Amino acid sequence: MRTTIAILVTLLATTVTTAHAEMRAGVARVEITPSTLMTMYGYANRKCGLANGTHDPLMAKVLVLESGGTRMAIVTMDLGSMVSDALRQDVQAKLGIPVVLLAASHTHSAPAFLPFGSAPSTNAAAIAYRSELEAKVFGAIEQASKAMSPVTLSVARGSLQLGYNRLLPRDDGRTRALFDNLERVPYGPVDPEYVLLRVDGIDGTPRALLVHYAAHPVVLGPTNCKYSADYPGVMQAAVEAAMPGAQVMFVQGGAGDINPIFMARSGDEEKDFGVVQTMGALLAEQVVRANRTATPVPSGPEGITATSEVMTVKDRWDATQTLEVGITTVLINRTIAIAAWPGEVMHRLQKDWKARAEVPLPLFYGYTFSAGGTWAGYVPDLRSAAHGGYGADASTRVEVGTGEKLLERHLINLYGMLGMWMDKQGKP
């Protein structure tokens, strides 16, 4: 593995005498439901072909943060995946926002519009939708960047196991995926923690709430043929109803091996969307309750810093082929550290980041494009890669050890932004 591009964005407070860098934020949203019926994302065994309608709208929501002289944009989208270096570069060049995190929820009830790997798309509907999507998201980021005002940040945590680990050990010592778990057995291990990052106006009114959780949005199965945000959409709508004026956003974590414990597989549309409602409402209830316990995030003069890299990794099954994988590590006021990964990362890597990142609030953004390159697909940890199963030694392309190597890069970047790499030997 080698680093092919290294971009360091380090714009700190403009004067050393400033006690605290003011935090400012702007929010915006835009609907991104396709205007046409397209092939749906995921599920190779889906029988419906094109979507046959919309159950609930797909949304893109934007939070632009500014501190210490620089800005970053977090964009959450009700999509299966998202790759757009053109959009990232446009936002950087035209809006002056150097850090852009494009985070997909990974709902499987969204349109399929991205080509596989680096091959260009030949599907006219997919090309048109992608162009429309990029224009809409750019417009929302621009809108948010023009509506900046002073804010404070606060954080809350909780735990709720709404997922199970779908890689189950078998009699031969290998693991294989259990995609459907209608008995709702809480197979483990998982990471059940949810983290809330709240953005408040100076009057204390919540402006945005980012909900971070790790579970595949596949409550709806392959019989569903309608566009839907799945359980994250239900959760966001319910929390917004309980917190008027707040834009609620969902950030998917390391959910590569985690399926929802509520699964809608009856083929009866009314019943199946009822199951989605149940899971989303359960998470929403916990979010609303935990929000009441949110505590302020310390402010400081450091502002926002970020390091982006594009790494070259070998194809696991063909060593003559390589993939370019972009990652971004963000540090906000030496308190919040975000590790952004463009793929389906397994939960152990999320837990390792949270255990090893030496900041009060380490956040793990899976399914997030931020720094060029391609979609990494499944990124297993070493143990999962060794034991096998879907996403571990099947349907994954990255060479063994990629997950740990990318995690190490995130940690190296974080320590660098914390000023811990010295230019000469330290004291014995």
Image (cartoon, helix red, strand yellow):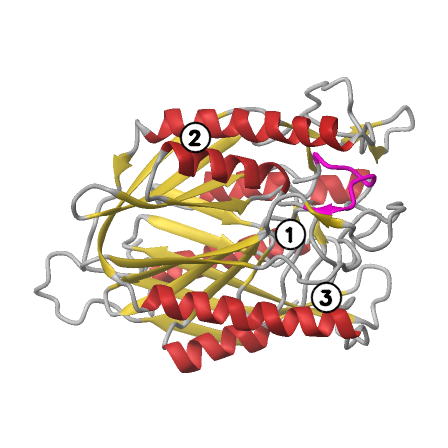
**Label 2 with label 3: CB-CB less than 8 Å:** no
224 is within the stretch colored magenta: yes
The percent coordinates of residue 60 (x first, y second) are 52, 56
Q: Tell me if I can see residue 140 in this picture.
A: yes
In the image: residue 172, left or right of residue 149: right
- The residue under label 1 is 403
- The residue under label 3 is 114
Tell me the SS state at disc 1.
Answer: helix
State the residue lying farthest toward the left: 17
Q: Which residues are magenta?
A: 219-227
- For residue 356, above or below residue 149: above
In the image: residue 138, left or right of residue 204: right
- The residue under label 2 is 287
| Labels 2 and 3: the sequence-earlier one | 3
Q: What amino acid type should be assigned to the residue bearing mark 1?
A: Gly
82 is within the stretch colored magenta: no
Mark 2, Cα crowd under 10 Å, few <14 / some 14-19 / many 20+, is many
Q: Residue at x 78, y 25 (%)?
A: 181
Foreground residue among 290 and 345: 290
Task: Give the CA distance from mark 2 to mark 3.
Answer: 32 Å
Q: What amino acid type should be assigned to the residue bearing mark 2?
A: Val
Q: What amino acid type should be assigned to the residue bearing mark 3?
A: Leu
Mark 1, Cα crowd under 10 Å, few <14 / some 14-19 / many 20+, is many
- For residue 119, above or below residue 17: below
